[in-house]
Image (cartoon, rainbow, N blue to C red):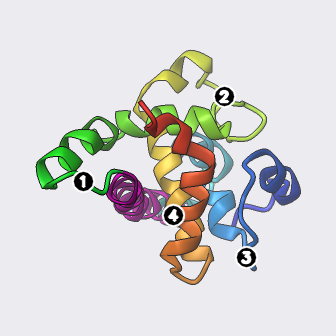
Amino acid sequence: MIDDIDVENLKHRLNLPPLQRHELIKLAVCHGSYINERYGQEPLKRKTLQREIKRLAHIGDSIMNAAITDYFFHRISEADQGVLTLKAMPFKERRRGAVPFAKEVGLSDLNVCRLGKGIGGKDLEGDMLGEMFEALIGAIYLESDRNFTVARDWFHKECGGLLNF
């Protein structure tokens, strides 16, 4: 798939849980602009990789939301459904809610993620970084053989501090 990414660097910088495979992790840290440049002469591969990034972000969004819900459910035992919903809502905003988590784990570091040449630091303030985070947590979930506990525990450990407000 993507073979020019140093997995050991990713494991260290993102504090990834132990995983048997890392192909989806490597894909998750790639932006579509990078895929366009890298595979511009291979339209089928380019289209396939871009589709897979979107699929990772889709499942990752659900895993992230479930991890957020789990976090509040277990930490506020006296809260009813309404309180839990209000606590979790700011963190579940489509893409933008994931941006602080992406920064927290280090995805905004240009030595971690792969971006096209025209993409710079300012671009990392928007939805792009949130989508990459969602793809990353989706990849962790899938690479751990769809073990929600692995993805949830990584999220709580790496991002739980942002949930305490």
- The residue lying at 73 percent from left, 74 percent from top is 19
The verdict on residue 71 being magenta is yes
- Amino acid type, residue under disc 2 in the picture: Lys
> Which mark is first along the chain, 2 or 4?
2
State which mark lies toward you, 2 or 1: 1
Q: CA distance from mark 4 to mark 2?
A: 33 Å
From the top left corner, tell me how far across and down residue 73 is, in percent. 32, 58
From the top left corner, tell me how far across and down residue 63 is, in percent. 41, 63
Quarter containing the C terminus: top left
State which mark lies toward you, 1 or 4: 1
The residue carrying pointer 4 sits among few (fewer than 14), some (14 to 19) or many (20 or more) residues within 10 Å by Cα, namely many
Q: CA distance from mark 2 to mark 1?
A: 50 Å
- The residue lying at 51 percent from left, 80 percent from top is 146
Q: Are marks 4 and 2 in contact (CB under 8 Å)?
A: no
Residue 45 versus residue 86 in the image, above or below: below
Using the image, tell me which numbered label, if any, was put on residue 147: none
> Which mark is first along the chain, 3 or 4?
3
Which contiguous range is marked in magenta? 48-75
> Which mark is first along the chain, 1 or 2?
1
Q: CA distance from mark 1 to mark 3?
A: 40 Å
From the top left corner, tell me how far across and down residue 107 is, in percent. 64, 38
Quarter containing the N terminus: bottom right
Q: Are marks 2 and 1 in contact (CB under 8 Å)?
A: no
Q: CA distance from mark 1 to mark 4?
A: 22 Å
Quadrant of the image occupied by residue 122: top right
